[in-house]
Each structure stands twice: as structure tokens, then as C-alpha cells.
Image (tube, helix red, strand yellow):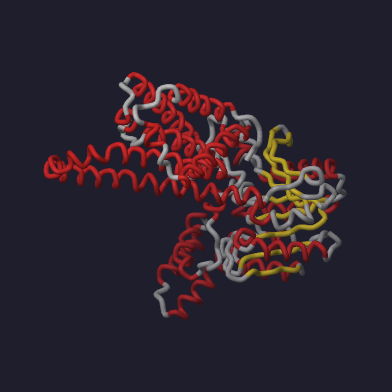
């Protein structure tokens, strides 16, 4: 939500008020007779709705045109409905101005003079992802449409009674067919609108729970220049003097800045949390000209981290930065902590990756043990592992996962896609990036160099000790980066690790409260 003047809201109000002002001087015959009987409760709803809508559509800039918005279709529909509304009034003003002229359907909308603007404002609220405008439109609709439906019913009751017997037999079947068609068409539309409203409601709730007072803290989402590219970062914290955590997302090529509110909300009271769309992916990719990711290499990633650490250290007057890496990000983070201990306060590996080969073996052995205990046929699983041992490819490793997945369900795993959709910061660019890497060929095109690097990584050989405090946190059901592989490595390098049972690879999303508790406990133990 963004406060400010909305010119679109002003245009909508002018399109609403001008024809209503003209109508006030061109009331239909006998209208005053029916207006005296208006339901007082509906009238209260109408008045409250009018006030709320008139104010709210003017004070949120989210109502203004945003061409690249995910929700732009709703604005287009809202504008179309308002144009139909003007056409409805044009028809009425040219008519004899009877109750029948006012309340006859227009473009398939009953009581179009009431329903069209209400639905238009509802759609404008969906476009703006603003639950307040949506709620105001519903309140207005209950009152405004309800009143005019009653007027219509009263005005046409006698006419309906006179003609019902004559037409009932002829039109009965036709009306039933039309009613069924309307239901078939309207039900999925109404359900879709309802789902959107629920998502927006949750998104707005997440927005309010994520609010930071920027007088003392910081809440920014912007691009900073890092080694020749403008790269996207978010910075959130309630105290600008707090220790800084730089979070490195996984993948490679899987930025999740739009989802990090889940765990960062639990940390921002004590830390400033920085999330970053790494070079070659997400909003950073879309911002820059390197569309073939020619500058994307593991070494370049380390250089980018170093530049970002320097930027954060200077900006927040910190001698050292806390590095937190998830999955592939834990490879980069652990390497950076190993190579630059003088700049790192501590390293936290989330779903710590150790080695592709050892992780695949751990995944296989655990699934095999569980399959045998269940008396299941293990032929497919065993063949997949043997094939992996021969080929040592990502595709072959994926075959192991296909058979092992049955035994590695994470009961507390949360849907990351839903987490993203209800995020207060999820925008078009996030969707555009993931649309680019939906299929395997596209994913490999943008991430092949990094995947080749990841496939060769073995922390046991390259990082057998650290000069900074190191902590690992994994889900007890994480087999993307096998939890047993992490435990073995943690024991080897003598670092503390914690396991959150029932959680999967996105342990920080699955149980953000427990995750944050462990992070705080670990960092406090080393003075942060």
C-alpha cells in the first residue's frame, strides 16, 4: 500500500458524480414515491459506502496506472465497466425517463446504474491490492444495489403479476435454461474474484505486520551499483544501529526476496536484514543488459558479495557483517566466510549444502532404509542410484529424488508459491523472472555455469575449518541438501547445528518463529 493522490480515483469519481448530478434533475416518473420506502439499514450501508469509496480511491497511489502490474487486467475491466456506466446513462437521458427506462438491464447487468460502478470500484480495489477499497465497495454494493433492487421490484411488481400467467408456460423453459447458463458463467467468475480478495486480504495483513517506523529503522527496496551492475536489494530493520544480516538466496537463480518477510519479520527487532537478488537472476537480471548471463560466474558472485558487504559496512557503520546463506547461497556464504573472515561476524548456513555426491548418497541410503522397513520394492530406487553413480549428472540425481520423495515428505512444509503470492512485496518482475526459468532448458541456459560449479563443490575438501563462528540450521526432512550430510560435515568442522523437525528445505519459511529463535540464540552466544 502506498499513500498519495490517485488521479485514476479522481477520474472514477467524476465519471460517477457528473451523470448522477444530471440525473438528480431528470428523475424518472414516480421515483419519489418509491424512494420514501427505502430500507433504513440499506440506506446506512449506502451512505457509509459512498463516504469510504470517495475517500479511499483518492488516497492510494496504487490505483494509478502501472502498466507492468500483475493486476493491470483488473484496471482495464474497471475502466470498461465505467465506460458502460456512462453509456447506460446516455441511454437513460435519451429515453422517456420512466422507471422502466431506469431499471431495465444494460449490457446484461441488472440495475446497471447501481451495479456497474460498484463492480468497477471492486475491480479497482483488486487492481490496487487494497482490502479497504474492496471492503468499501462491498459495503456500498450492499446498500446501493440493495436499494435499487427493491425499487425495481416494487416498480415492476404489478406488471409482472399481469403478464406472468400469459408468459409462464412459453418462457418457463427458456428462463430455466438462461438461469443455468448464468450460473455456469457466474459461479467460476465469482469464485475467482473471491480467491483474489482472500489473497489480497492476506497480503494486506502481511503488509501491516511488516510495517517499520523508518524514523528509527530502515525499510527499503532499491537497486545499488555492484561491480558494474545495478543489483536489487531489500533492507529491513527497526534499528539502524543493529547488527546487519546479509541473506544469500539459493538456486542458483532462485531469488526469494518476496518471501523473506516470513522469517525476517521475526528478526528485524534485533537485526537489519538485507536480501539480495544475485547477479543473473530476478529483478537484478531484468534491470541489466547481460541477458545471456555472460558475467555470471562463481568467482564473480564472491566479488559481488564482497562489494555488497563493503557497502553495508560503510552505510551502517559496521565492522563486520553476518552472512546467512540458504542452499546454494550457503555454498557462497560459507566460501565467503572462509576467504574473508576479517569481514564476517558469523556465518549461518540454512539447509547447508556440502556436496552433491554425498547428499545424493545420503538421500538414497535413508530412502532405501525406509523402503525396506516398509517392505516396498526398492528396484527403481536402487537402479536410479546405480545409474547416478555411473553418470554423475543432475538428471540422474533427480531420478533418485523421484523414487525417494515418497519417504521424505516434510509434514510441516509450507507452500512457497503461496507465500510469494501473499507477500506484500511480490511484483511483476518476480513473476517475469520465474516465467523465464520454468522449463529445464531455460533454467540451464541462465544457470549452467553455476550448476556446473555446484556439482563439483565439496566443502570437506575446500573448507575443513573456519576462523569465524559458524552455525547450521536444517529441516529434519530436508533431503535437497541432505540433513545427514550436513550433520556429518558439522561434526567434521566442529560447528553447532540445529534441526527443526518436520520441516523441509525451506526451514526458515516452514517455521520462521523457531528458526528466528535459534538464529538469535546462536548470534547472542558470540556477542551479536
Q: Going 74% across and 50% down the picture, which residue do you hit?
A: 273
Left/right of residue 433 with respect to residue 143 in the rendered view? right
User: Residue 412: x, y in percent?
Assistant: 56, 66
Residue 346 image-quadrant placement: bottom right
User: Residue 120: x, y in percent?
Assistant: 46, 34
- The extreme top residue here reads 94
Left/right of residue 510 with respect to residue 41 in the rendered view? right
Q: Going 23% across and 42% down the picture, which residue do you hit?
A: 178
Above-or-below relation of 7 to 270: above
Q: How many marks?
A: 0
Left/right of residue 174 with respect to residue 495 in the rendered view? left
Above-or-below relation of 499 to 294: below
User: Residue 364: x, y in percent?
Assistant: 52, 69
Above-or-below relation of 246 to 389: above
Left/right of residue 265 with respect to residue 150 in the rendered view? right
Q: Nearer the viewer, residue 367 or 430?
A: 430
- Residue 440 in view here: no
Q: Nearer the viewer, residue 355 or 438?
A: 438
Q: Going 46% across and 49% down the picture, which residue do you hit?
A: 195
- Residue 52 in view here: yes
Q: Nearer the viewer, residue 45 or 468?
A: 45
Q: Nearer the viewer, residue 129 or 335?
A: 129
Residue 528 image-quadrant placement: bottom right
Above-or-below relation of 443 to 477: above
Quarter that holds the N terminus: top right
Amino acid at each position: 500500500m502506498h499513500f498519495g493522490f490517485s488521479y485514476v480515483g479522481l477520474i472514477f469519481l467524476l465519471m460517477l458524480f457528473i451523470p448522477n448530478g444530471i440525473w438528480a434533475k431528470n428523475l424518472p416518473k414516480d421515483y419519489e414515491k418509491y424512494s420514501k420506502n427505502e430500507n433504513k439499514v440499506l440506506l446506512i450501508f449506502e451512505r457509509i459506502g459512498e463516504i469510504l469509496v470517495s475517500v479511499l480511491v483518492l488516497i492510494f497511489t496504487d490505483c494509478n496506472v502501472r502498466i507492468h502490474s500483475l493486476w493491470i487486467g483488473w484496471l482495464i475491466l474497471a475502466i470498461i465497466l465505467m465506460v458502460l456506466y456512462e453509456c447506460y446513462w446516455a441511454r437513460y437521458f435519451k429515453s422517456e425517463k420512466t422507471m422502466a427506462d431506469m431499471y431495465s438491464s444494460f449490457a446484461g447487468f441488472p440495475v446497471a446504474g447501481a451495479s456497474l460502478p460498484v463492480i468497477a470500484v471492486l475491480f479497482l480495489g483488486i487492481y490496487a491490492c487494497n482490502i479497504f477499497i474492496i471492503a468499501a465497495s462491498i459495503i456500498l454494493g450492499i446498500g446501493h444495489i440493495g436499494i435499487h433492487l427493491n425499487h425495481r421490484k416494487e416498480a415492476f411488481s404489478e406488471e409482472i403479476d399481469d403478464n406472468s400467467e400469459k408468459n409462464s408456460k412459453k418462457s418457463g423453459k427458456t428462463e430455466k435454461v438462461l438461469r443455468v447458463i448464468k450460473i455456469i458463467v457466474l459461479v467460476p467468475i465469482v469464485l475467482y474474484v473471491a480467491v483474489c480478495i482472500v489473497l489480497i486480504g492476506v497480503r494486506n495483513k502481511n503488509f501491516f505486520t511488516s510495517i517499520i517506523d523508518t524514523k528509527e529503522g530502515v525499510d527499503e527496496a532499491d537497486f545499488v551499483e555492484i561491480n558494474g551492475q545495478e543489483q536489487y536489494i531489500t533492507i529491513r530493520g527497526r534499528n539502524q544501529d543493529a547488527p546487519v544480516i546479509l541473506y544469500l538466496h539459493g538456486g542458483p537463480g532462485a531469488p526469494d526476496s518476496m518471501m523473506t518477510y516470513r522469517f525476517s519479520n521475526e528478526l528485524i527487532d534485533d537485526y537489519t536484514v538485507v536480501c539480495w537478488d544475485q547477479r543473473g537472476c530476478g529483478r537484478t537480471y531484468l534491470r541489466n543488459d547481460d541477458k545471456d548471463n555472460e558475467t555470471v560466474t562463481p568467482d564473480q558472485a564472491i566479488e559481488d558479495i564482497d562489494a555488497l558487504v563493503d557497502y553495508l559496512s560503510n552505510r551502517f557503520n559496521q565492522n563486520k557483517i553476518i552472512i546467512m546463506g540458504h542452499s546454494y547461497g550457503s555454498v557462497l556464504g560459507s566460501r565467503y566466510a572462509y576467504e574473508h573472515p576479517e569481514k564476517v561476524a558469523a556465518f549461518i548456513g540454512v539447509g547447508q549444502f556440502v556436496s552433491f555426491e554425498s547428499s545424493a548418497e545420503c538421500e538414497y541410503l535413508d530412502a532405501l532404509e525406509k523402503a525396506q522397513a516398509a517392505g516396498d520394492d526398492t528396484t527403481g530406487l536402487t537402479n536410479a542410484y546405480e545409474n547416478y553413480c555411473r553418470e554423475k549428472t543432475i538428471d540422474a540425481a533427480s531420478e533418485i529424488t523421484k523414487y525417494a520423495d515418497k519417504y521424505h515428505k516434510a509434514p510441516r512444509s509450507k507452500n512457497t508459491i503461496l507465500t510469494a503470492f501473499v507477500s506484500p512485496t511480490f511484483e511483476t518482475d518476480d513473476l517475469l523472472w520465474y516465467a523465464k526459468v520454468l522449463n529445464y532448458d531455460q533454467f540451464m541456459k541462465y544457470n549452467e555455469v553455476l550448476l556446473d560449479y555446484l556439482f563439483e563443490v565439496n566443502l570437506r575438501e575446500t573448507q575443513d575449518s573456519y576462523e569465524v563462528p559458524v552455525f547450521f540450521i536444517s529441516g529434519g526432512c530436508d533431503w535437497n541438501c541432505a540433513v545427514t550430510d550436513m550433520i556429518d560435515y558439522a561434526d567434521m568442522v566442529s560447528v553447532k547445528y540445529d534441526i527443526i523437525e518436520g520441516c523441509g528445505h525451506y526451514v526458515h519459511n516452514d517455521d520462521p518463529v523457531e528458526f528466528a529463535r535459534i538464529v538469535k540464540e546462536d548470534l547472542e552466544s558470540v556477542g551479536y
